[in-house]
Amino acid sequence: MQITGLKDWIGEYQKPLIIAGPCSVESKEQLNQTISPLLEKVQVIRGGIWKPRTRPGSFEGMGEKALQWVKELKAEKPFRFATEAATPEHVELALKYGVDILWIGARTTVNPFNVSELASALQGVDIPVLVKNPVHPDLSLWKGALERFSKVGITKLGAVHRGFHAYQQKKYRNPPFWQIPLELKSEFPELPLLCDPSHIGGSRSSIEALSQRSLDLNYDGVMIETHYQPSIALSDADQQVTPQLLLEVISKLTPRDSSFTKKSYLDQLEIIREQIDQADRELLEAIAVRMNLVEKIGEFKKDNNVAIFQISRWKEIFKSRPDWAKQMNLDPEFIVDLLRLLHQQSVKRQTEVFNTVEEKQTNSND
Ligand code: PEP
Ligand code: MN
């Protein structure tokens, strides 16, 4: 991929690059009140014109008239404006109203048909395109989208890390899985990488720590949702910060050296540890599922008066699992040891099931 560096199209700025502005442009007044205090410190103003909402009936953005407000405000006090484009029609309108930067939303990056359509609409247009990560943790889709824009000649490219959907995760709205953007960066070191702590954290209180974390990992900048009155925001009210809070957060952020430092080494270690924690949790959840099934089969055996220990099943398990282990690049001997332990525990659980049922029967005979 041919990539034009950030400074070649933004101009000189103090790292990190700051993109800030409302989740959605709601009115000219809201945009004006939100961005006026920011223009000195923020290199790019963001604002959603068309909003991808998970369910129908919520606020879906003000559309073309919001582009008109942006244009009018830009005429009063110049600023760079970025918005999300999800269809060729959005691209056309954004270009018509002089939008400076487009971003591709997480729900669009997942769909190669959409991305191809957008790339065709941008063929021959010299506009920066920031590609958010796809909703689910699939690095190839993220790369694929960037490559599609690169192929039509876009060189002012960037990646925005906004976290990934994970079922029943509570800590973050979209857990970061930092390893994925870091892999992207290691494959394309020239590609600017920005962090969107607003959509990762989903709450005002996590913005500062997530932003600093991204700078510790050598990200180039952050995109932070800002609203002059977050509590009445028409979208993403919980995660937007006031312009005052944004300025405070920016002033506290510490940019890091690009070269290897002990701190970044420790951070990477922590990321891997977080991933190990997550893997262990999933492992325990799988064991819990297995144990519930074991209990069920115990009851079934008891009801049908069948012995707990079935030699044919035992043999089958110890024949198939080492083969599965080999396919997964795991040591079959280690897996056999692990299965012995699991099997031992299964027999114990089923014996408890048998005994519990017997006790019940004894009681009912009393
Ligand atoms: C947004 O930036 O407001 C947005 C909708 O983001 P994402 O595509 O990351 O959900
Ligand atoms: Mn938002």
Image (cartoon, grey):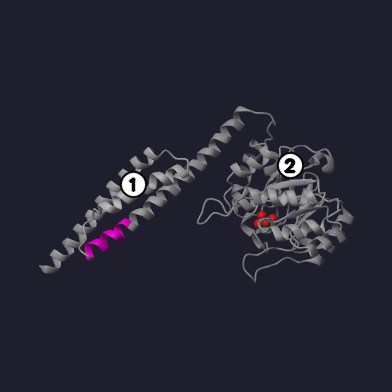
User: Mark 2, mark 1: which one is toward the viewer?
Assistant: 1
What amino acid is labelled 2 in the image? Pro
Farthest residue, direction right:
75
| Quadrant placement of the N terminus | top right
Q: Is residue 121 visible?
A: yes
Q: Residue at x 67, y 59 (%)?
A: 111
Q: Which mark is residue 116?
A: none
What amino acid is labelled 1 in the image? Phe
Q: Is residue 98 above or below residue 55?
A: above
Q: Provide the secondary structure element on which disc 1 rests.
A: helix
State the residue position of label 2: 192
Q: Nearer the viewer, residue 222 or 118?
A: 118
Looking at the image, is mark 2 or mark 1 earlier in the sequence?
Answer: 2
Residue 13 in which image quadrant: top right
Q: Nearer the viewer, residue 235 or 127?
A: 127
Q: Is residue 219 left or right of residue 170?
A: right
In magenta, the rendered stretch is 294-303
**Count of numbered circles on the image:** 2
Residue 110 in which image quadrant: bottom right
- Spot occupied by residue 178 in the image (x, y as percentages of width and height): 60, 43
Q: Is residue 229 visible?
A: no
Q: Residue at x 82, y 43 (%)?
A: 10
- Spot occupied by residue 187 in the image (x, y as percentages of width and height): 68, 39
State the residue position of label 1: 318
